[in-house]
Amino acid sequence: MIGTTRRERLVNAITISRMAAAPVALLAAWVGETAWFARLMAFGLLTDALDGPLSRQLKTASPRGARLDSRADLAFNSAGLVGVAVLFPQHLVTQWPLLAAAVCAYAGPMAAGWFKFGRLTSYHTRLARASLVLCPLALAAWLRFDTLFPLQISVAVLVLSGVEELAITWKLDRPIDDVAHVFRVLTLDSRRRERCVPKVYEN
């Protein structure tokens, strides 16, 4: 990539690999390859857990990387949801309220950010990071062991994350990447918010 260092390219390659795996996961679900779909979902979780800490460790965090990560998350999470619907339609039908809550909590803040700022937001709050780990694990536990409680908890965390992101979007005048939590925005005065310096929000 033009204008990027070798370290940045390494982190970006990990993120892009997750994005590239999304259509492959969809194909696996379409042809009924449940095992390969599960492996690709595990790969997505691994790369999602790896690229952020690695970026901070290598000191390559940037607004461009944050937005790329958000796009990869959107592609992969959408592929995961569609794949589960294709492979396990009967499960989703029985728990459609949970599914509707999860979709609204995930899509609502993205729609609000796009409507206000004209682009996807990349807050990466702590609640959002937690939900991105909890939801797939709880979903797997539900499908494998028919245990619903972890899924209910993970969706509740996702809903809280969505409410927090909506509050951040409402408060900001311009988009800021990598916001740890809403209180970081609420405690800043308007001049510092308008500067949109991502490093302020990393801790």
Image (cartoon, rainbow, N blue to C red):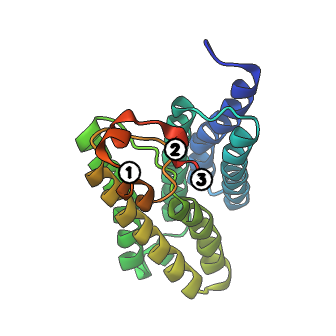
Q: Position of residue 203 (x, y in %)?
A: 59, 53
Q: Are marks 2 and 1 in contact (CB under 8 Å)?
A: yes
Q: Quadrant of residue 33?
A: bottom right
The circle drawn on residue 49 is: none
| Residue type, mark 3 in image | Asn
Which residue occupies the foreground of this view, 170 or 86?
Answer: 170
Q: Amino acid at mark 2?
A: Val
Residue 5, relative to residue 32: is it above or below? above
Kind of residue indicated by mark 1? Leu
The numbered dot on residue 188 is 1
Q: Secondary structure at mark 1?
A: loop
| Label placed on residue 203 | 3
Question: In the image, is 115 to the left or to the right of 65?
Answer: left
Q: CA distance from mark 2 to mark 1?
A: 10 Å
Q: Which residue is mark 2?
A: 200
Residue 137 in percent (x, y) is at 65, 70
